[in-house]
Image (spheres, rainbow, N blue to C red):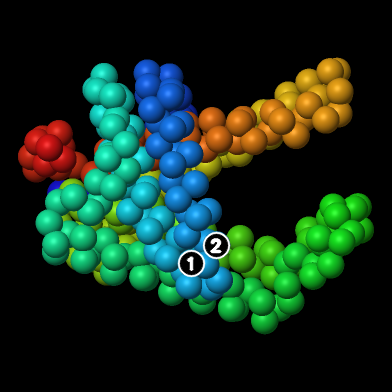
Amino acid sequence: MRLKHVPASTGMQWVRQGVQTFFRQPFAISGLFFMFMAGVSLISIVPFLGSMVAIAVTPAATLGLMAASRDASRGVFPMPSTLITAFRKDPSSTRAMLILGGLYVASLLSLVTVAMLLGPSIPDDIAETGLTPEVISTIVNSPGLWLSVLLYIPVLMLFWHAPALVHWHGVSPVKSLFFSLIACWANKGAMLVFSLAWFGLMLMSVFVVTMISRVIGGSAGGFLVYPLMLVLASVFYASLFFTYKDSFDFDTDLDAVID
């Protein structure tokens, strides 16, 4: 396995492949993502510990959604069990994925701790006041918010390809973080285009929903936003497999390795 350099335009190709793959199996992929979100929400009910567990299983769930995308791209219907692909290989692979999840928890806790030292990014009384212009201004101008965003970028790069490397190639959790970071940096142009394309899609979608809600009634927007975000997130996760597939050259056929 070697790093592969791709042009910046490949970022748009990843988005298109994700969209095409999603529409091959829209109900399966969106259903799996909904199962992931529902499971995380249920686990998070347990105070503190539940949130930590929910974060820890995120890399494993990401691997499951990547596996579902790979199946859908080949015309195979992803079964619900695909979501737990990370825990179906062997005990050593499961242990490595759990270690990766623990590292993800530690990274996010460190990030939040550092950001909180500069002040909370969300006011404590937001539940009472709501999203008023003053509250939005406070959030946008919060040093903690922008520091969190800046710090999360390298964390995201570290864990972007790590679940696939750990599960499908037997790379150790720590080494997978290093390889993931290097791969993202090597293809930073494509990753930037990929990120900007998704940001643009989300803004455009919110704009369309806002316009529709104004035409048919203000309350309609609330009913449209959640399913729209569910679909967009599902398509986004469907595109992750292609960012991984094009970032590495494999000595053996990738499908053979995954199978």
Q: Earlier in the sequence, mark 2 or mark 1?
A: 2
Q: Is residue 255 above or below residue 1?
A: above
Q: Amino acid at mark 2?
A: Ile
What residue is at 54 percent from the left and 30 percent from the top? 231
Q: Amino acid at mark 1?
A: Gly
Instruction: Please identify the quadrant where the C terminus is shown.
Output: top left
What residue is at 52 percent from the left and 67 percent from the top? 46
Q: Is residue 3 left or right of residue 10?
A: left
What residue is at 85 percent from the left and 52 percent from the top? 131
Nearest the viewer among 53 and 144 is 53
The mark found on residue 45 in the picture is 2
Q: Residue furthest bottom?
A: 117
What residue is at 37 percent from the left and 18 percent from the top? 24
Q: Residue 188 at what x, y percent from top left?
A: 43, 48
Q: Residue 169 at what x, y percent from top left?
A: 16, 52
Q: Is residue 103 left or right of residue 245?
A: right
Q: Is residue 51 above or below residue 113?
A: above
Q: Is residue 67 left or right of residue 139?
A: left
Residue 116's quadrant in the figure?
bottom right
The reply to whether residue 71 is in sight is yes
Say few, some or many: other residues with alpha carbon within 10 Å of mark 2 (under 14 / 14 to 19 / 20 or more): few
Nearest the viewer among 30 and 198 is 30
Q: Is residue 187 above or below residue 21?
A: below
Q: Are marks 2 and 1 in contact (CB under 8 Å)?
A: yes
The mark found on residue 50 in the picture is 1
Q: Residue 135 at what x, y percent from top left?
A: 86, 59
The mark found on residue 162 in the picture is none
